[in-house]
Image (cartoon, rainbow, N blue to C red):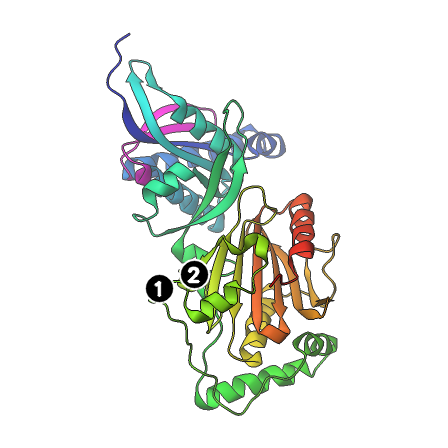
């Protein structure tokens, strides 16, 4: 067997999810039509991005690309085409995709190397409608592609000795509609429009039981007269600015060293300072954001924006309740609290009313253990350790 020099490629594996169940419930003829439609859209995307189909077996594809970015773009194109077909009334194409990149040897029988095995295992972790990539792929493509990488934490993959960090890939235009897209930033108002918006908010709060609950969370009514101050974030300054240093000093000690400035515009909420803390893989939360606000009104509006977007009901988040909004208080601290699960993520949002700070903790996954672990983590980390 002649072995050529090794080279770096992007490897994509794609599988239909629940195909066997579809065959059983819809019959062989319908299943054959679904498989044909699936293969057609995959092969169209593979051709568009310069891939080579190495092996197709049943509902599984194994494709190689000359670059990691080509594999990622192809994966996103497959998911978009599948979603469009389903939306148009066609048979639902539920596909999970995994991408990895690395050096392999090209032999007469195909590509040989660990990168191929890792890509196949990554695909097995992907849910329906999900594209997962490794940290290697993220590092190679993060400055080339207009995508968002959502940390899905370290995983033990079958047959792979070391844990592999996985990321879910989303197009930026699709990520805008996620739980914390650009639309969820603190609204900016001017003139009569601002006063009308705040007045409408107060009127809504005075109507119904949810209104009473929210006023209890807020602690006081937002002022309606003076204009809201302009943002004071010093985006281009060296980290930390005085405001950022003050905010970081309010972060609990165990995670303080993991904090840096929030660079993503879509993730900044506070108009004074915003920091992002990426926790290590042993933590029960993946990422925590802390945002400080100049006045109570802006803090209230930021929390209320999330509440309205998620449509949570007034109640108490607890180890057994993962979707609600209410209050919390402990050791002289307190504020608003919200919990929910969306887009494959588990979230906790809470405020420190006296300090005008809003915090958000995210954990990948929506299983019962994901919520229990995140809530337990929050319950021990919520108190400031100044």
* Image coordinates for residue 132, horizontal then vertical, percent: 46, 40
Direction from residue 73 to residue 20 in the image, left or right: right
* Image coordinates for residue 383, horizontal then vertical, percent: 66, 62
Direction from residue 298 to residue 85 in the image, left or right: left
Badge nearest the viewer, 2 or 1: 1
Please tell me whether residue 158 is drawn above or below residue 205 in the rendered image.
above
Q: Residues within 10 Å of mark 1 (few under 14, many from 20)?
A: few
In this view, the residue farthest toward the top is: 1
Picture quadrant of residue 307:
bottom right
| Gap in angstroms between the C-alphas marked 2 and 1 | 10 Å
Q: Which residue is mark 2?
A: 261
Quadrant position of the C terminus in the picture: bottom right
Residue at horizontal 63 percent and vertical 66 percent from the top: 311
* Image coordinates for residue 266, horizontal then vertical, percent: 43, 63
Q: Residues within 10 Å of mark 2 (few under 14, many from 20)?
A: many
* Image coordinates for residue 337, horizontal then vertical, percent: 66, 65
Q: Which residues are magenta?
A: 49-70
Q: Which numbered tag is attached to residue 238?
A: 1
Residue at horizontal 31 percent and vertical 39 percent from the top: 70
């Amino acid at each position: 067997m002649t072995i050529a020099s090794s080279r770096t490629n992007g490897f994509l594996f794609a599988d239909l999810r629940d195909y066997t169940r579809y065959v059983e419930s819809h019959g062989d003829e319908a299943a054959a039509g679904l498989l044909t439609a699936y293969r057609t859209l995959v092969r169209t995307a593979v051709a568009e991005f310069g891939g080579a189909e190495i092996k197709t077996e049943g509902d599984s594809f194994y494709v190689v690309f000359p670059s990691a970015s080509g594999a990622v773009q192809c994966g996103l194109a497959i998911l978009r085409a599948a979603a469009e077909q389903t939306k148009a009334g066609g048979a639902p194409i539920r596909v999970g995709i995994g991408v990895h990149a690395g050096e392999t040897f090209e032999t007469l029988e195909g590509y040989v190397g660990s990168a191929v095995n890792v890509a196949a295992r990554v695909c097995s972790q992907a849910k329906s409608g999900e594209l997962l990539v490794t940290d290697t792929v993220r590092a190679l493509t993060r400055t080339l592609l207009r995508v968002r990488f959502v940390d899905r934490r370290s995983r033990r993959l079958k047959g792979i000795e070391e844990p592999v960090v996985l990321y879910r890939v989303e197009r930026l235009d699709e990520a805008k509609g996620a739980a914390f897209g650009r639309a969820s930033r603190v609204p900016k108002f001017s003139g009569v429009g601002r006063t009308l918006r705040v007045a409408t908010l107060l009127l809504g709060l005075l109507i119904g039981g949810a209104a009473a609950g929210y006023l209890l969370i807020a602690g006081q009514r937002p002022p309606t007269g003076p204009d809201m101050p302009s943002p004071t974030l010093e985006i281009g300054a060296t980290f930390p600015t005085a405001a950022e240093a003050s905010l970081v000093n309010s972060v609990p000690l165990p995670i303080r060293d993991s904090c840096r400035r929030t660079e993503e515009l879509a993730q900044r909420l506070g108009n004074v300072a915003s920091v992002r803390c990426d926790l290590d893989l042993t933590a029960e939360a993946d990422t925590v954001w802390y945002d400080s606000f100049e006045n109570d009104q802006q803090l209230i509006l930021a929390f209320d924006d999330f509440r309205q977007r998620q449509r949570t009901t007034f109640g108490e988040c607890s180890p057994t309740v993962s979707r609600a909004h209410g209050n919390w208080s402990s050791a002289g601290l307190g504020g608003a609290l919200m919990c929910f699960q969306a887009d494959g993520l588990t979230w906790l949002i809470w405020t420190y009313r006296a300090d005008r700070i809003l915090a958000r903790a995210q954990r990948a996954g929506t299983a019962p253990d994901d919520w229990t672990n995140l809530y337990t983590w929050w319950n021990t980390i919520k108190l400031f350790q100044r």
